[in-house]
Amino acid sequence: MPVQVRIPSVLRRQTGGDESVQLEGATLGDILDGLETRYEGLRGKLRGPKGEIRRFVNIYVNDHDARLLDGSTTAVTDGDEVIIIPAVAGG
Amino acid sequence: MSYVKGLKCRECGTEFPVAPRAICEDCFGPLEVTYDYAALRRSFGPDAIAGRARSMWRYRELLPVDGAEILGLEVGCTPLVRADRLARTLGVDELYVKNDAVNFPTLSFKDRVVSVALTKAREFGMTTVGCASTGNLANAVAAQGVRHGFETCILVPEDLEAAKILGTTVYGARLIGVRGDYDQVNRLCSQIADRYGWGIVNVNLRPFYGEGSKTVGYEIAEQLGWKRPASLVCCMAGGSLLTKIGKAFDELQRLGLVDDRPTRLYGAQAQGCNPIVAAVKDGSGEIRPVKARTIARSLAIGNPADGYYAARAIRESGGWAEDVTDVETVEGIRLLAGTEGIFAETAGGVTVAAARKLIAGGRLPRHEPIVLVITGNGLKTTDALAATAPVYPIIEPRLEAFEEAFPPAAAAVDFSGSAPRGAFPSSGRSAPAAPLSSARTL
């Protein structure tokens, strides 16, 4: 089974209201490529021109911040969950 | 009347109307409240507010509220204490402590941000409020949320200090402990805010919530006679407080209420969670998240949402940032308590210890006014001190036993009212010697 991607409400205008989507790939970068292919409106929102994850976007692979893993080259396998969340303030 | 113009993305400048939203739909950047400063310049100033109650709401024109009802009218206006004894120990000329350890009602600066957030939640017609918290915010949302008739939903890491848990549940607030660190709690809270229509103060109410922190800056300036200090040292978790104090000072300058000389901003973190300090020191300004490990639990945010802005504000102001060990943090708590009689929580220990390092290292000038911002109360984090608490004698209820434990010569010293020695033995300068030696001759 593929990787499940959860989409926050702030991005659902671009996904036609879809809250989650199943995508195939070997790395987080593959998954994000697939996401941008399916939802063209997401292109440029999550990653900058060099493919880097944008400053105010947090992406988690199975609970772990992708920046603490290997960023876009983080390996993913069937059944993994990718969560996209805007950065929020502290407390 | 309100002077709020709307919300504006800090990154791309896209404007949005006032609503419970925190994120730019175009670029994910954070939204910031904008004001009509031209109109404010005509109507806001020392004379206009002179007769108002001593509360953070004396600056209400600079806060993002539209309605008539303010929740938390008693919050703020904490003391700015002239700290001469601490100044002597640190070797500086003029030092002040902004003491939010005695803020009302829950003894931390978070009462300010929650007062604004709940006022907005009421305006928006919300009936449930909540937060992700490292403790102080949980206390503030619990106390003020319950008092103003909201349902509450407060999420914290499960292993928080006992005092911060009790200081939430005592109000009858609904508390949920999460197996994970603060960053994981925060992520869950974002998902909850996304699914339910609740007012999560530091998620969908964040643009308004954050503005409450500006009142620390307004108060400091007014308490100094409408002047900015040359330097200000503040602890950093998410980085919002320091950034907002900087914004407050900039606004006062823009309104012509303070002179043009800016304040150097200095940020303090624990070595076990120092992503903003690292971004300042390496000059990149980019935040690399860390896994937090520190006794300063209220600062244990490994992925600080406002870290980028805090690092930029520090660099642009000509300030600097420093991190300190857990041992230095405890020494900082004892130093502030032993010189000024102010018991700060671990975050305050970080601030004092970082200030000491910045002064000793020459980064923080000694001969200009300095303000240390103390954000929370030491009674909430006594766990951090338990292992190194000073021992004291237990005696029988007899005068002989007392005099054995406390010889008359020593008693004479204390009756003179002079300073205890060595409140902070590792400091470069000792406590003032003259009063102590004169007391001994009595």
Image: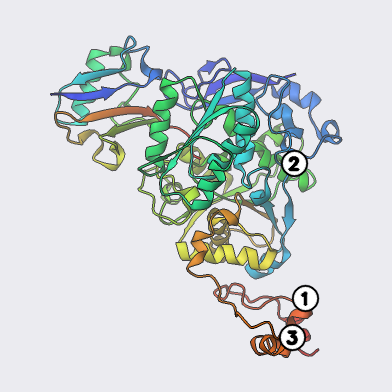
Query: Foreground residue, B201 or B234?
Result: B201
**Pointer 2 indicates a residue of which chain?**
B
Amino acid type at circle 2 is Asp
* Residue beneath disc 2: B259
Quadrant that contains the N terminus of chain A: top left
Q: Which residue is drawn at the image coordinates 33% and 25% (left, top)?
A: A46
Q: Quadrant of residue B343?
A: bottom right
Residue A43 percent coordinates (x, y): 30, 18
Task: Give the Cα separation between the discs numbered 3 and 1.
Answer: 12 Å
**Pointer 1 indicates a residue of which chain?**
B
Q: Is residue B27 visible?
A: no
Q: Earlier in the sequence, mark 3 or mark 1?
A: 1
Give the vertical position of B256 relative to B320 (above or below): above
* Residue beneath disc 1: B417
**Dot 1: what SS?**
loop
* Residue beneath disc 3: B437
Query: Foreground residue, A86 or A1?
Result: A1
Q: Nearer the viewer, mark 2 or mark 3?
A: 3
Which color scheme did the rendering employ for the protein?
Answer: rainbow
Q: Which residue is drawn at the image coordinates 76% and 85% (left, top)?
A: B412
**Dot 3: what SS?**
helix
In the image, is B295 to the left or to the right of B360? left
Residue B237 percent coordinates (x, y): 49, 45
**Pointer 3 indicates a residue of which chain?**
B
Task: Give the Cα separation between the discs numbered 2 and 3.
Answer: 44 Å
